[in-house]
Image (cartoon, helix red, strand yellow):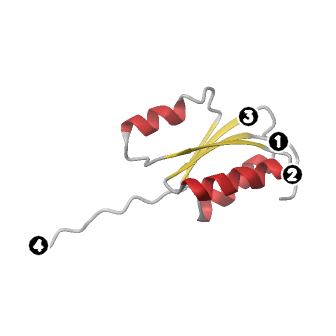
Amino acid sequence: MTQGTGRLSNKVAIVTGASSGIGRVTAKLFAAEGAKVAVGARRESELASLVAEIKASGGTAVALAGDVRSEDYAKALVAFGRQDIRSTGYRVQQRRHAR
């Protein structure tokens, strides 16, 4: 991960859907810019990999695996403390009902 300009230094970012795709890229970008990142998603092993990657590049990150549709999980995410930035990189699929 390339280090950025530091424009997010002393900021805390919460990124959901961070185990893959846009959420993962967003978390890495925020960390590269100096933010402390709390990442969330359902796949714990992918989150652990992401946190290790961020830390290996000199960033600060913690992970919390869970489902954003759960109120308890959402409360646990915001319990990390100060939130300067929130990013939702997840997609909630809804079933379509036949007419």
Kind of residue indicated by mark 3:
Lys
Helix, strand or loop for disc 2: loop
Q: Residue furthest front?
A: 45
Kind of residue indicated by mark 4:
Arg
| Residue that badge 2 annotates | 4
| Residue that badge 3 annotates | 11
Crowdedness of circle 3 by 10 Å Cα count: few (<14), some, many (20+)? Answer: some
Q: Are marks 1 and 4 in contact (CB under 8 Å)?
A: no
Q: Position of residue 43 (x, y in %)?
A: 52, 57
Q: Position of residue 22 (x, y in %)?
A: 61, 62
Q: Is residue 69 left or right of residue 78?
A: left
| Residue that badge 1 annotates | 7
Kind of residue indicated by mark 1:
Arg
Kind of residue indicated by mark 2:
Gly
Q: CA distance from mark 3 to mark 2?
A: 14 Å
Of the pair 31 and 85, the residue shown nearer to us: 31
